[in-house]
Image (cartoon, coloured by chain):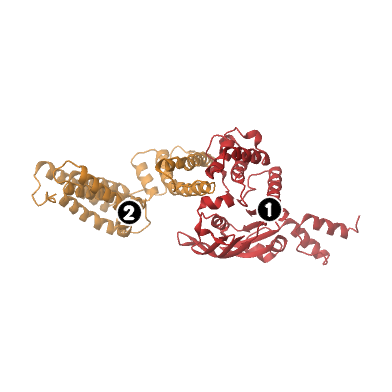
Chain colours: A orange, B red
Amino acid sequence: MSFLEVFQYTRQDSVVHRLDPRSKLVMAIVLAMISLLFMNIVPLLILLSVLLPLIGLARSLQRWAKSMSGLSVLIVFIVIFNTLLSTVANPFSYSIALSLRLIALMSSFSLFFLTVHPDELSQALIQMGVKFEFAFAMSMAMRYVPTLGQEAYAIMDAQKARGVELDRGNILKRIRNIVPIIVPLIIVSIRRALSIAESMESRGFGACENRTYLEQLKFTRHDWALVLVSVVSFCFLVYVRFYLALPPWMSWGLPF
Amino acid sequence: MIQLDDVHYAYDGLYPALRGVSLEIDEGESIAIMGSNGAGKTTLLKHLNGLLRPQKGHVFLDGEDTSKYSVAQLSRQIGLVWQNPDHQLFLDSVEKEIVFGLKNLGYDEEEVSDRCDRTLERLGLTHLSHRSPFSLSGGERKRVALASVLAIEPRILALDEPTIGQDARQKERLAKMLDQMNEEGRTVIVVTHDIEFVIEHFPRTLAMSEGIIVADGKTEAVLSNPTIVERCSLAVPQMTIVAQGLHQLHPEVSPRLTQVNEIESELIRLAGGI
């Protein structure tokens, strides 16, 4: 699961971290859509050569590299299966492009999640008109993911001590072994949700109709510039993709 | 029987929880592990049945290194009961919950139902055997979790915070049961903050602080020692406070008494006897 690390916020001070989450969201969506526009190796490599410096600017290249090496198993699968089973003309070239697209997609969104604190994210949602309760529920959900992970380990320990062998047996047995883990996990989570709700209410959650916020997000000139660059380059690339033919060197592919 | 030799463990390799723990526990002992939060008590328990493996050092059971055995193999010998019963309950009746562990370890039908009934009776759960564990109270769930491990009848029983959420009666019952297990020759290890519970039922106490064993010895000696009590953020036993008060007025009374009956006889003596 280490490839998911690239979607985890890292507390750091960088140009990218300081940007407004809304402008970063625009950028991430644009980058992701660009990666979906092209299915050739060269344009995707060019896109990656834009993405990597950006991740470098966010001082997260190491984490990115670690995540990608975690992803490599999946990529090998994608390449093997697509090469063997795909019906397109050059299956190997095609599956390499597919893998590059996956990497580009993940990197685009990781740029957002790596640099946006969950609190910032919910503040951004609120300022975009989402109701506070929903935004709060979302940031709580994110906050409790690691807690849930710890709980899962504690439950595994408890069941192992009762003779459950989680890493033994055939596939059917292993699937059955999930039950003693998942049921307590759900019940513990529901119990906790109830007690959190009670404790929030007893501390006056939802008492005021109109909330004020300690920190308001502000769009700076940098943010406007980023949004502008993103939107303009997106429009340009859509134009290139649909109304101009790609130059031959751009649509170059491996011969098999 | 259990022997830990210079056991080190750090979570994620970064956060040390045990830094060189060595100890020996003999067959049939009854021992309490006390210490401040984060002292490494639970981590120590997890090393007993192999849930955690020492990063440095060794754990021996009957002279054999436990690294050779799986958790399932070790859990036949060592039953661990956890703090939070909700981490292990998942079936829709108390009975099934108890049977689950036994079936995992491959006991036959008859043996399973025998042990199940015995355990239910022992913990006063017979009348709840068909109820769903999730509809029970916290204290009852805790006893069900205990029963599910107890049914395996392990030679060594280790419990993490068994007295939390139990009323005085249930605590007494639990203590009695542990005493009985101990009399049958089983080794009982308990991690707890409940100082009076320890004084009454556990002759030996380990005091831990910051991943090392600060003191290991007779319960009354450990718990009446102000330095250890301070270091491990334990509470001074009530009877020791009384003893210290008496000691100021009557220097011949030892300030390190812990048992109710000791204080009682001192008071009777001071009052001139009956």
Residue B133 on image: x %, y %: 57, 37
User: Residue at coordinates 54% horizontally, 49% vertically from top-left?
Assistant: A161
- Taking the image as shown, residue A239 lies to the left or right of residue A208, namely left
Q: Residue at x 33, y 41 (%)?
A: A128
Write down the residue under mark 2: A70
Identify the residue under disc 1. Answer: B185
Q: Position of residue A194 (x, y in %)?
A: 51, 38
**Disc assigned to residue B161:** none
Question: Chain under label 1?
Answer: B
Horizontally, is A83 left or right of B102 in the view? Answer: left
**Which mark lies nearer to you, 1 or 2?**
1
B241 up-or-down from A156: above or below: below
- Work out how far the residue at label 1 is from the one at label 2, CA to CA, in angstroms: 50 Å
Q: Is residue A96 left or right of residue B146?
A: left
Which type of secondary structure does the marked residue at label 2 adopt?
A: helix
Q: Chain of mark 2?
A: A
Residue B156, compared with residue A127, is above or below; it is: below
